[in-house]
């Protein structure tokens, strides 16, 4: 899928992407440091015993599913509803490996006669999470592929492209087994020397597996 290069738009999206990811990483790092310092203080008797959340361990596997909105970086009318699915294997309370896929479907786009298009992504990469009890902000960076399929005016086209997808979000933990998730990602597609950074907003549910310590 050949992209439409718009330098100003792309620069704006890239700036927002890196600003967002940096903010999430700072939040994760700050929260993780606080979790390390508080138990040390409690040993001296300056605080209450160790945070309860640290005694419960962490979910070994987290599976998330939900709805998402994909917004094209070049054509604002190319916005579409779709889905996402992710599975994360956590190796410790703050780090894990995640596999994530998504699909979005464009139909009857304004100013593009008879246009139909599908975009699928699949990525793998690290996720870093700050577990503070009820709130669990996270940042992740995925590497993978994007598949485009489009048809317009009796012409069809398909394309595979390289994908980098920085992003992050927040899990609101409602129980040991369930959380509500919101996320913001920036799928960046590399196609024939052209780089397109898009935006994807998602909301869904996270199913938390058996606890590890």
Image: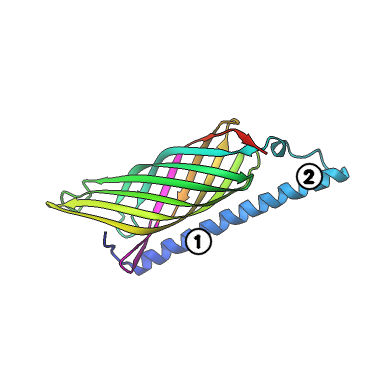
Indicate the quadrant containing the C terminus: top left, top right, bottom left or bottom right.
Answer: top right
Foreground tag (2 vs 1)? 2
Query: Which residue sits furthest left?
Result: 154
Observer-nearest residue: 28 or 77? 28
**Mark before the other along the chain sequence, 2 or 1:** 1
Observer-nearest residue: 169 or 206? 206
Q: Where does the magenta region start and end?
A: 188-204
Indicate the quadrant containing the N terminus: top left, top right, bottom left or bottom right.
Answer: bottom left
Observer-nearest residue: 55 or 81? 55
Q: Residue at 48% across / 41% down in the picture?
A: 87
Name the dominant secondary structure of the magenta segment: strand
Secondary structure beneath dot 1 equals: helix
Residue 178 included in the magenta stretch of the image: no
Q: Residue at 38% across / 45% down in the picture?
A: 102
Looking at the rendering, which quadrant does residue 179 occupy?
top right
Residue 117 screen position, x and y as percent = 24, 49
Residue 47 screen position, x and y as percent = 82, 42
Dot label at residue 39: 2
* Residue density around tag 2, few if under 14, some if 14–19, many if 20 or more, within 10 Å: some
Give above or below for 186 relative to 93: below
Side of 159 relative to 113 (left or right): right
Residue 64 screen position, x and y as percent = 47, 38
Query: Which residue sits furthest right?
Result: 44
Side of 50 relative to 190 (left or right): right
Residue 86 screen position, x and y as percent = 46, 42
Looking at the rendering, which quadrant does residue 61 occupy?
top right
Side of 149 relative to 30 (left or right): left
Residue 189 included in the magenta stretch of the image: yes
Residue at the disc numbered 1: 18
Q: How many numbered callouts?
A: 2
């Amino acid at each position: 899928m050949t992209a439409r290069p718009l330098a100003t738009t792309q620069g704006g999206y890239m700036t927002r992407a890196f600003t967002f990811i940096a903010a999430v990483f700072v939040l994760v790092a700050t929260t993780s440091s606080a979790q390390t310092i508080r138990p040390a203080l409690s040993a001296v008797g300056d605080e209450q015993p160790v945070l309860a959340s640290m005694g419960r361990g962490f979910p070994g596997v987290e599976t998330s599913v939900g709805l998402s909105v994909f917004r094209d970086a070049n054509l604002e009318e190319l916005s579409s509803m779709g889905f996402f699915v992710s599975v994360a294997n956590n190796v410790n309370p703050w780090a894990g490996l995640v596999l994530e896929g998504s699909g979005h479907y464009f139909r009857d786009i304004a100013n593009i006669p008879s246009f139909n298009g599908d975009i699928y992504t699949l990525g793998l990469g690290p996720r870093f999470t700050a577990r503070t009890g009820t709130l669990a902000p996270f940042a992740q960076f995925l590497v993978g592929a994007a598949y485009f399929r489009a048809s317009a005016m009796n012409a069809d086209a398909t394309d595979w492209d390289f994908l980098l997808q920085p992003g992050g979000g927040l899990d609101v933990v409602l129980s040991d087994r369930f959380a509500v998730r919101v996320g913001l990602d920036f799928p960046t597609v590399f196609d024939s020397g052209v780089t397109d950074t898009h935006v994807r907003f998602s909301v869904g549910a996270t199913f938390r597996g058996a606890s590890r310590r």
